[in-house]
Amino acid sequence: MTEAGLPSPLDDRIELRGLELLVFCGVLDEEQARRQPFTFDIDIYLDMTGAVDGDDLDQTVNYGATIELISSTLEAERFLLLERMASRVADLVLSDPNAASVTIVARKVRPPVPSIVASTGVRIHRAQA
């Protein structure tokens, strides 16, 4: 919010909800032997003024290209920790200069724990350097 109480351009965000990917991530041998299911919720914060005023894709973040970049990268890489994987996703999103900051929620579906739990996860927020 601005000092006048109005929304700031960086209150604008693109929301990606429920991105489902199969990824090698985990410290157990079984987690590195086969891909595990993960879901991602991603909020990309940016100034949408140029995109709104000019109806111009170059003035925003192309979420289709972003999803493809995340999917192809995570398919090719392996991680031990969910925290590291979430940070990698944030780095990929922030490779677009139009993205000012990003919040990543990464959830491991059906984690290998002795209790019944739907998912475990992390939430991180990163900004352009």
Image: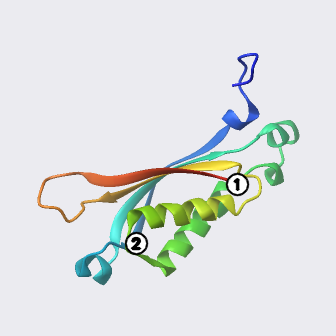
Give residue 24's quadrant in the image: bottom left
For label 1, the SS is loop
Q: Is residue 80 visible?
A: yes
SS at badge 2 = strand
Q: Is residue 96 above or below residue 7?
A: below
Mark 2 or 1: in front is: 1
Assess whether mark 1 and mark 2 are in contact (beta carbons under 8 angstroms).
no
- For the residue pair 94 and 128, the one nearer the viewer reads as 128
State whether residue 111 is above or below residue 16: below
Asked if one can make out residue 18 in the rendered structure from this viewpoint, the answer is no
Q: Quadrant of the N terminus?
A: top right
Numbered circle sitting on residue 23: 2
Q: Residue at x 50, y 72 (%)?
A: 74
Which residue is at a point 38% across and 62% down the rendered structure image?
A: 38
**In this rendering, would 15 be left or right of 127?**
left
**Residue positioned 75% across, 34% down in the render:** 9
Count every numbered label the image shows and give the total: 2
Residue 88, image x and y in percent? 54, 66
| Amino acid type at image mark 1 | Gln
Query: Percent position (x, y) of residue 126?
Result: 59, 52
Q: Which residue is mark 1?
A: 128
